[in-house]
Amino acid sequence: MGQLMKVALGAGFAILVAFYVNSTMGGMTHGGFLVMASVFGAYMAMNIGANDVANNVGPAVGAGALTIGGAILIASIFEAAGALIAGGDVVGTIKDGIIDPGAFGDDSRLFVYAMSAALLAAALWLNLATWLKAPVSTTHSIIGGVVGAGIAAGGLSIVSWSTMGQIVASWVISPVLGGIIAAGFLYIIKSKILYQEDKLSAAKKVIPILVSLMVMAFITYLTLKGLKQVWKSVVETLSFLPQSDKPSFMVAIIFGSIAAAVTYLVVKPRIVNKVAMMRDARSDINLLFTIPLIFAAALLSFAHGANDVANAVGPLAAINDAMTHMVVSLKAAIPLWVMVVGGVGISVGLALFGPRLIRTVGSEITELDQMRAFSIMMAAAITVVLASQLGLPVSSTHIAVGAVFGVGFLREWLDSQNMKEKQKVLFVEVEKHHTLKEKLASLTPDDYKDRAELLEEIKAHKKKVKKIKNDLRDNYVKRGMVKKVIAAWVITVPAAAIVSALIFFILKGIGV
């Protein structure tokens, strides 16, 4: 499908949303503004699908466990399901309490301008990041948008700078935690299975335990993050559960432990049967991680849809609430049409524009196989659970990409002997290059024929040295991608904030 066709289909979705809102709510006061805001919300949702969802399925695709088409199908279904089933019916109007809604007073129009500017600015930044093939945090994008519009509307004092400090800390905490945990699991797999004399016997013992731990991590993660919006309905149905507004860590761990025990009993005999028909080779053992990876991609997508759809629909729900009641509220109800815009929009964006970032996360940072991808998915779930209990600010995008970095750097460290051999080859070639240059310097101007031949040889050899250096540097983790991704993370909040402030002033000036 050509790029223009994809853009046309994306625009078609936004137009359908605008048509629906106009036909049902266009007659209300300033209904035209709500139509415009709904288009911004649809655009934001599509960009979340294009950029953020790649982290959930990219490792599975890079490892060959899923095709791009299969990944898009699974993620689209589970993202939409997570948003519509567990996305909740109420959302905070100000993301993470980063600005004081009281600063808007009774001026609901000023608040509406700020939320609209934040929504469009975040979407524009995500669009640019996706085009640049940089996986960035959609949460940080919307936070930057809210901060920029908030400052434009009420000055610097409107921002909770302590909260912003925590967000800045997450730029380091998230990828480091994700990288360490992913590297730790990969090291366990390598040391307990691949480095054993009898790999198949080791696999029969270790893999059922690892898969059970994965299920425990994901069920705990899903309970804490994916069901928190609908927990009241869950405890009403299951009256034996502790009556609370959201799931506790202990309840989530109990759910996870039960699921892990059942998984072990189911998986153990299946692994034993499969191993009996396999060769004692890494490639065969890798295949044992394929099905767990597919389930991990589905569960991550469901939790993401339930938890992060608020990034798309939160500001839109806030705009709808403010225009309906003409007041600024801390919480806003999410109408069904708003949730559908978020859930379906994420799936549309993923299907049309997701492959670009899926390839980046799955294969353009480091080479992945099923074992490495499994370690990354484990890190994604465990880090969120661990950080939420420690009160650490984290970003799911930064965790997943940090986990990819961690896997790549562990491979470098473990293969240091091979790296040393390559460095010896580089040293020899560099010395040869210097020898050729010295020989060139010794020639007289009359030796123009020999000089020309030597210059060509030096030029060819220089390319060879450069290639060895690049291969050595990018053998496991492509440094260029690391630099680009980190730069994109650092500028996400300020970039979205600046664009948002400009859009706010435009909307206020137009006075729509």
Image (cartoon, grey):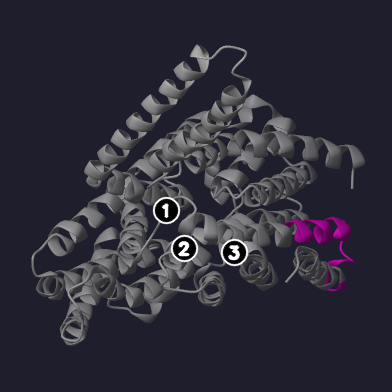
Front in this rendered view, residue 64 or 72: 64
For the point 79% across and 69% down, which residue is it?
5
In screen coordinates, is 485 left or right of 232?
Answer: right
For the point 24% across and 68% down, which residue is it?
282
The answer to whether marks 2 and 3 mark residues whose Cβ atoms lie closer than 8 Å is no
Q: Vertically, is 480 above or below 197?
A: above
Q: Secondary structure at mark 2?
A: helix
Front in this rendered view, residue 127 or 197: 197
Q: Vertically, is 368 above or below 122?
A: below
In the rendered structure, which amino acid carries the disc numbered 1? Ala
For the point 53% across and 55% down, which residue is it?
360
In screen coordinates, is 120 left or right of 466?
Answer: right
In the rendered structure, which amino acid carries the disc numbered 2? Asn
In screen coordinates, is 342 left or right of 501?
Answer: left
Q: Which mark is residue 146?
A: none
The image quarter in which residue 293 lies: bottom left
The answer to whether marks 2 and 1 mark residues whose Cβ atoms lie closer than 8 Å is yes
Q: Which mark is residue 355?
A: 3
Q: Secondary structure at mark 1?
A: helix
The image quarter in which residue 345 lies: bottom right
| Location of mark 1 (residue) | 400
User: Depth-wise, is mark 2 or mark 3 nearer the camera?
Assistant: 3
Alpha-carbon span between mark 2 and mark 1 = 8 Å
> Is the residue marked by circle 1 packed among few (<14), some (14-19), or many (20+) residues within 10 Å?
many
| Location of mark 2 (residue) | 56
Front in this rendered view, residue 256 or 488: 488
User: In the image, residue 134 lies at what x, y percent?
Assistant: 57, 47
Q: Which residues are magenta?
A: 23-40
Alpha-carbon span between mark 2 and mark 3 = 12 Å
